[in-house]
Amino acid sequence: MQASESAVRQLGYLVFECAPGVLEPMSVVYREILGAAVEPQADGAVHVRLDGRGFRLRLEPGKASRLAAIGWEVPAEGFDALVARVAATGAALSDPGAEMAALRGAARIMRMTDADGFVHEFHVDQPFAEDAALKAKFVCGTEDNGVFGLGHIVQIVADMAKTTAFYTDVLGFDLSDRITWPAADLFFLHCNQRHHTVALSAPAFGMPPGAVHHLMFEAKSKEQVDAAYARLTELGFPVIMTIGQHTNDEVYSFYMGAPAGYAIEFGFGGKVVDRANWQYQTFDAPSSWGHELQLAPQP
Ligand SMILES: [Fe+2]
């Protein structure tokens, strides 16, 4: 499916609940290692900004660390059509209300929970002004060469075929490629110019359906990635995979262990998708060099 007005345009935001003691070190990760703007809120949550949007990540205090919502930004003119397609799958959609929409920075919002327990929030964004300083640091949201969204998320799902069909047939994603190797079999999907916004895996890496394997954020320079990698050790956070380069999206990156239980990939130089001419292919290794595994992420 080509980009259409009723397809998801980008990964707009993520909301996480953080177990006691986790919110503070996660704030350190986003502020001190990635260089994002980290802004405590009056309600006890912390907003992480990567561009001018009010938040790209919202970290809330909770009983356990978990992904609470995946925010999918949809163009205003296509919102009703997308919601109708989601409803036609039999998914139970609910309207979280005007107060929640305002909290999310959304003009409209509808929510559903999928079979693996992932909560999807389809929304129309409120307009926001760009933040030049952050824009210089992160490939996020809308760039001069297209729409990229906040980064990517790797989800563990029970039913690969059904979940892939939901992303492609209902939300308007296209398959980018597949990497099959002894440790896992990953399917990568794009909804805009970012090589992948979602990667899907059957249970692997010791993780059950409903788990997040990692999040990826993209820097505007290789130097940012190298500096962040150096700060990891200084600040005492674990390396999950050393610096390396992926075969499919060609990202130069490392993976760190985050106290919230998922890994964070910080990378540079992701391949830009030309949707009209994209050729699907299969790779037999995730990385062309580096990315040596140090520790498995904890489920
Ligand atoms: Fe990744």
Image (cartoon, rainbow, N blue to C red):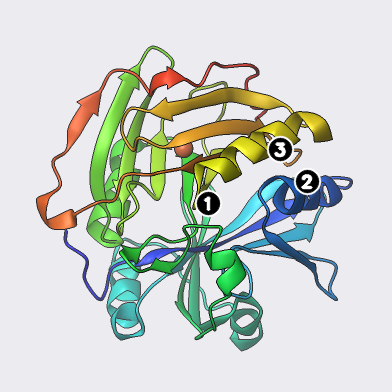
Local SS, label 3: loop
Residue located farthest toward the right when viewing the structure as drawn = 21
Q: Amino acid at mark 2?
A: Ala
Q: Amino acid at mark 3?
A: Ala
Residue at numbered disc 2: 64
N-term-proximal mark, 2 vs 1: 2
Q: CA distance from mark 1 to mark 3?
A: 20 Å
Give above or below for 259 relative to 27. Answer: above
Q: Quadrant of the N terminus?
A: bottom left
Measuring from the top left, give residue 213's x and y in whole percent: 55, 35
Q: Nearer the viewer, residue 217 or 162?
A: 217
Number of residues whose C-alpha sits closer than 10 Å to that of mark 1, classed few (under 14), some (14–19) or many (20 or more): many
Number of residues whose C-alpha sits closer than 10 Å to that of mark 3, classed few (under 14), some (14–19) or many (20 or more): many
Q: Who's the residue at 39% across and 67% down the image? A: 143
Q: Nearer the viewer, residue 58 or 20?
A: 58
Q: Is residue 292 left or right of residue 72?
A: right
